[in-house]
Image (cartoon, rainbow, N blue to C red):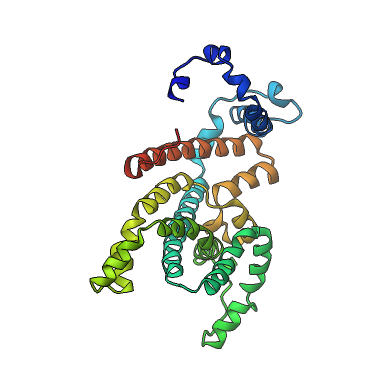
Amino acid sequence: MKKQNSLSAGELFKKGVFHRNSPLYLMILPAVIMLILFNYIPMYGIIISFQDYMPVHGFTGSPWVGLKWYRYLLDMPDFIQISISTIVIAVGKIISTTMFSIFFALMLNEIHKKKYKKIIQTAVYLPYFFSWVIIGGIFVDILSLDGLINQFLLWIGLKEPIFFLADNSLFRETMITLEVWKSFGWGAIIYLAAISNINPNLYESSSIDGANRIQQIFYITIPSIASTIVLLATLSLGNVLNAGFEQIFVLYNEVVYESGDIIDTFVYRMGLVNAQFSLSTAVGLAKSVVSFLLISISYRLAYKFANYRIF
């Protein structure tokens, strides 16, 4: 294999390597075509961020304005607030989901009866497979003024109901909590897989030395999965600007724009609702460039601290 990698494309073709692997190339061809059609060709549209785009004149007829929309974007007072909301919500989700996933994996590993373990696993993983459209509809009712949560809070002594989805002081925390509830079970799968690879002899030896289950968790389990935790936490840095469009779009409203409007929802409102195509494209392109840099940095950090590499 190493020898084949050192050959040029022409030499590989002469040796029949392409011919032998042609069934594999045909299998991957539909995916490549879809990637080109839906990911690369639409990138041509980013040129409208440098134009005063008018649909009547199209890409070629609209006047060029250089960096006008990027300067306009930086001068917008709302953009700083939107960027802060995006980072706060995204980082809150990453940290909270990671911590709950690790905690759940550790607790689930302590359950030795397979029947109960499978029931708990299924119950916790299930929300991950529902879309935010379904979950949003349910939680709009649950979190309303006369919803289940407020009825419980009033029952235990709260004097006035809380409108969770229309309170700027609670909206971000509510979004982070719902994301944790939906995703922590799924996130625990990788940590459970890492825990299952720990040598059982370590636990047996520690038991002989008198260690209890809590001590085994802190001195054997957590150090053994530390590289996995570092790897996933590092790779998640690339999602710092992805606060979750679908969730926010389904659950937010004009009252909580101050705390809940993120970059993706702002692009949607500017582009499709207000028809400011050039401005929304400039925002989307700026976000993509920053996200690309963050992903590159997280990949380098993952290689440095966890020896993780794709290529």
Q: Horizontally, is 27 left or right of 196 in the view?
A: right
Q: Residue 263's x, y, as percent?
A: 55, 47
Q: Nearer the viewer, residue 168 or 45?
A: 45
Identify the residue at image location x=69%, y=25%.
59
Q: Quadrant of the C terminus?
A: top left
How many numbered marks appear?
0
Outermost residue, right direction? Answer: 56
Identify the residue at image location x=39%, y=52%.
228
Q: Horizontally, is 209 left or right of 50 in the view?
A: left
Q: Residue 120's x, y, as percent?
A: 54, 71
Q: Is residue 6 above or below residue 205?
A: above
Outermost residue, left direction? Answer: 209
Residue 196 position by quadrant? bottom left
Determine if residue 253 is in view: no
Identify the residue at image location x=53%, y=59%.
186
Q: Nearer the viewer, residue 35 or 244?
A: 35
Q: Is residue 98 above or below residue 204?
A: above
Identify the residue at image location x=42%, y=62%.
102
Q: Nearer the viewer, residue 289 or 115?
A: 115
